[in-house]
Amino acid sequence: MINLDKSTVSFSPNTKQSDIDGVLEQLGIRETQGHAMYLGLPTVILKQKKIHFEYLRDRVFKKLHGWDNKFFSAGGKEVLIKSILQSIPTYAMACFRIPMGICSDIEKACCDFWWGVNDNGKNMYWASGN
């Protein structure tokens, strides 16, 4: 059974009002102007996709600010990055193509956490010579 009190429907702006009224009357359900989130994902993606996925970056930053990286060994940092930070955007990435800006911000935050920060600012990122 569908719980009509908890159910809503949204329509495209191109839908005729007579069609909207007919569907609402037939189904006996309310209309909404759009859902913000459903099951942790945005339901409507507009042209500026970055705005819709900023919550992923914010969640990663919130986790990182809650950890003080000077107390973790390299193994501890690796486990936190792989098991927690990289899992945050995974569900959204299974459904949507996340903007590269958001992915870059998350990757940069993970690198900053991994390499740490010293008294003069950030430590040097090491890279292979190839």
Image (tube, helix red, strand yellow):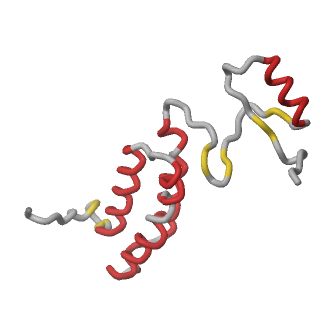
What residue is rendered at 51% in x and 64% in y? 63
Between 112 and 3, the one lying in front of the other is 3
Q: Quadrant of residue 24?
A: top right
What residue is rendered at 32% in x and 62% in y? 111
Q: Is residue 66 left or right of residue 76?
A: right
In the picture shown, does residue 124 fall above or below 1? below
In the picture shown, does residue 110 fall above or below 77? above
Q: Please state the total of marks drawn on the protein image.
A: 0
Between 25 and 119, the one lying in front of the other is 25
In the picture shown, does residue 45 fall above or below 17? below
Between 81 and 25, the one lying in front of the other is 25
Residue 56 horizontal/vertical position (percent): 51, 53
Between 29 and 45, the one lying in front of the other is 29
Residue 18 horizontal/vertical position (percent): 82, 17
Q: Is residue 60 left or right of residue 9?
A: left
What residue is rendered at 34% in x and 56% in y? 108
Q: Quadrant of the N terminus?
A: bottom right
Residue 29 horizontal/vertical position (percent): 87, 37
Q: Quadrant of the C terminus?
A: bottom left
What residue is rendered at 36% in x and 57% in y? 107
Q: Is residue 64 left or right of residue 41?
A: left
